[in-house]
Amino acid sequence: MYNVQPGYGAPQTHHRAYSGSPNYSQQQPAHRVHGGGYPAAGPPPGADPQLWNWFSAVDADRSGSISVTELQSALLNGNWTNFDLDTVKMLMSIFDTDRSGTIGFQEFVGLWKYIADWQNVFRHFDRDRSGSIDGRELSEALRSFGYNLSPSLLTLIEHKYASEPAVGYGPPPGITFDRFVRACVVVKTLTESFQRYDTRRDGWVTLNYEQFMTIVLSAP
Amino acid sequence: MYNVQPGYGAPQTHHRAYSGSPNYSQQQPAHRVHGGGYPAAGPPPGADPQLWNWFSAVDADRSGSISVTELQSALLNGNWTNFDLDTVKMLMSIFDTDRSGTIGFQEFVGLWKYIADWQNVFRHFDRDRSGSIDGRELSEALRSFGYNLSPSLLTLIEHKYASEPAVGYGPPPGITFDRFVRACVVVKTLTESFQRYDTRRDGWVTLNYEQFMTIVLSAP
């Protein structure tokens, strides 16, 4: 099992998980820090100079905080494509802890670490160094997180998160970084939701329409 | 009830629905036509000249068929943003009926009509002519399709498909065209899946993990 930084996407994680709910609850106190509002002129006391430089580069309009648009412009996959809006929204929902709609410097520090940790995971599982994750690599990554999914579920995920549709009945192209992160967080979120309803621990859940739709629409 | 073109997103539709399955089944015979391969020089016999012109414009590299990248470059929302990759993949899964990985002219004709019909739906429900769909407009659209969702589900959809995260606890920005289409197709797909498992018609389903994950990951 890959010794991943405390369980990103893994069921045993103690890291703050994507809450997925529109009222943005379940944020950990450690990240309940002031968001934007720092003067663009200089870093807050004790700031890591390198991180402050990166933050300032992303903050293109020098407003002192990073907007969704600035974040999406700054986040690139290995093949130079931008992150999907849905991945950016997922990241905002995790790291915009004061719900200001922007990412302040302290929030940026958490976001940066999260992305760097995921990049290490991605590089580890991209065995052939192709810059994207194929079906076999995806399967190994999810298994290392503790998810033993059936071949048919793995194929569904491989197609859903591929950066292009498959041609014919062949395998789809690989999964880029940002979609790999989203796929892992989605599997984690859905599995946890399922487990919450599986109160008898027998592998079955009984759901009404409202519960079913809420679970699905709450995932990133 | 809005008299929508045969039920896009509506449960009573007879139109070809997004199958959502990675083996791309359930395509209607009417669209099982040859995909790419027309000589870039001229239109096939009987082609609508205007549609041929549009097709040729989208086919930037004059290959005779439209790739995913060409399609994504050509499809714009009212605010000039490109369609999300996930919407483009959804459209490809519906209209690339010969699974060539590209859209030929005959496939393009179906795709064009689908988008034009949805644009009419979008304009109809965008009551305030803002170019995007807000929570109230979304609720009216879904109700007209036959989906009476709870306020809390509507809020979830409004946030999930908004073009940006909400600021604070206020309402999110509106839903752009392509994400509106995806939201409606997702609600339709999930509702139909739920109904398929609700064999006693009592509003409850019992699912194991495999079934649950398959339903969710099969939706666009």
Image (cartoon, coloured by chain):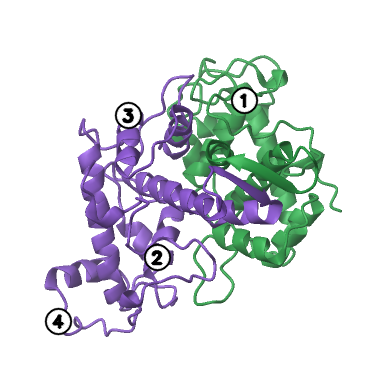
Chain colours: A purple, B green
Question: Label 1 neighbourhood size at 10 Å, few (<14), some (14-19), many (20+)?
Answer: many
Whole-percent x and y of residue A182? 40, 49
Name the element at disc 3: helix
> Viewer-nearest of labels 1 and 2?
2
Residue receiving disc 1: B107
Q: Eyeballing the image, is A97 above or below B105?
A: below
Find the distance from the CA under tag 1 to the CA under tag 3.
32 Å
Three-letter code for the amino acid on which mark 2 is drawn: Ile
Residue receiving disc 3: A136
Label placed on residue A94: 2
> Viewer-nearest of labels 1 and 3?
3
Residue receiving disc 4: A46
Find the distance from the CA under tag 1 to the CA under tag 2.
40 Å
Q: Same subunit under labels 1 and 3? A: no
Which mark sits nearer the N-terminus, 2 or 4?
A: 4
Find the distance from the CA under tag 4 to the CA under tag 1.
59 Å
Find the distance from the CA under tag 2 to the CA under tag 3.
29 Å
Q: Could you say which is closer to the camera, residue B192 or residue B138?
A: B192
